[in-house]
Image (cartoon, rainbow, N blue to C red):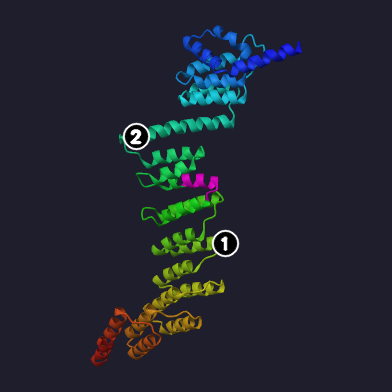
Amino acid sequence: MAARTTTTTTTNSQFSKSPSLVSTITTLLQTLNPQNPDPSPLTQFSPHLNPELVIQVINNNQKNPNHALLFFNWASNPNPNPNNYSHTHNCYIAITDHLLSHGLFSKATWLLQSSNKFSDFMVSKFIKAHVDLARRIFDEIVKEGVGHLGVSTYTTMIRGLCKTGLIEDAEKLFDEMSCMPDLVAYNTLVDGLCKKGSMESVQSLVNPMIVSRNCELDEAKKCLNEMLNLNCEPNTVTYNTLIYGYCKKGELDKGKKCFDEMVSRNCEPDTVMYNTMIDGYCKKGELDKAKKCSDEMVSRNCEPDTVTYNTLVCGYCKIGQLVEVKKCLDEMLRRNCEPDTVTYTTLIDGHCKKGELDEANKLFDEMVNRNCKPDTVTYTTLIRGYCEKGQLNERRSVLMRW
């Protein structure tokens, strides 16, 4: 008896895997009315029910998903049920995918709710199906040019793609936006990238946003804060870009606040960043703060460069503090930081404006002796100084050296 049972089971298994059985069931389903079904003709297939057969029949009924649903519902509670068949998780996945691929969201929802199968996994399938449908409609609108897509539409689409894990598609869509992205659009993509751990992509996204002329700096700072909230640490380039923007607008308090925040997060400021802050202070005439910044720079083992000293020299020259200028030049040389044409020209200009032409001429000679080539601005500055003092012979002397 046991041998006979084994033989029967094997035969049924082979039959269930046979394409002819799947085809027979599919043909029969085409004759049934899904709206007013009489599933009794399906009873003959009860002995052959197994998950593989059910999935094959579902996938074989691509044209009319209602026939697949009819078969699935019958197989949920067949009578008789000699094999005590019940649907597996994969069967529910198959019918859910099938219904969603045809846009039958309400039927898929009812099926899963009534079967108590509405898990997080299934919910993600609904979200992706909605996104896929929305993307098809979206792409068609773009292709046909039937309407103008605003930033909110793009943001909604990007959010859907991010939620379904399609981050690369979201990035591509962001890059293809036909309108200027706003803070919400940036934050939506930043959120998706951070959750995926794509920190380099976040940096490359945020930095251009900050320098964009169409982006308000305060909005850029909000985006930076969003990165921090998502445990995505901005790098030195990000902070430097934001600080540069604030300094350029003369909002040094906000720039300094960003600077301090960066330091507190163990993100070491570099020479470029210090130079940005020093330049900002010098342009506002706050030379004490500029010098304090350069001293801090040295104390943190961040080496000042020619740009650092040129900025300070220019700042001191503008307010006529030539003693401080000399100190800067001495420190510069002490640190083996070679003065360039800009350095000497700025120094010469400062002395010329104070009428100290002998000092200006000495600097000019020193410049030449150090193989630092004067440029047109250097000669023009010195000539103008002699002209203003009425020393025309000296002016001619400079012209002859030019």
User: Whole-percent x and y of residue 85?
Assistant: 65, 16
Q: Is residue 314 visible?
A: yes
Magenta includes 189? yes
Most foreground residue, 396 or 80:
80
Residue drawn at (34%, 44%) of the image: 178
> What type of secondary structure mainly makes up the magenta span?
helix
User: Whole-percent x and y of residue 152?
Assistant: 40, 40
Q: Which residue is mark 2?
A: 141
Q: Quadrant of the C terminus?
A: bottom left
Q: Is residue 83 visible?
A: no
Q: Quadrant of the N terminus?
A: top right
User: Whole-percent x and y of residue 339?
Assistant: 42, 80
Is residue 58 positioned above or below 134 on the image? above
* Residue 351 image-quadrant placement: bottom left
Most foreground residue, 142 or 206:
142
Residue drawn at (49%, 51%) of the image: 202
Is residue 226 positioned above or below 294 on the image? above
Secondary structure under badge 1? Answer: helix
Magenta stretch bounds? 187-198
Residue drawn at (47%, 80%) of the image: 332
Residue drawn at (54%, 15%) of the image: 20
Most foreground residue, 280 or 239:
239
Secondary structure under badge 2? Answer: helix
Magenta includes 197? yes
Residue 159: mark in rendering: none
What amino acid is found at the position of numbered circle 2 in the picture?
Ile
Q: Which residue is mark 1?
A: 264
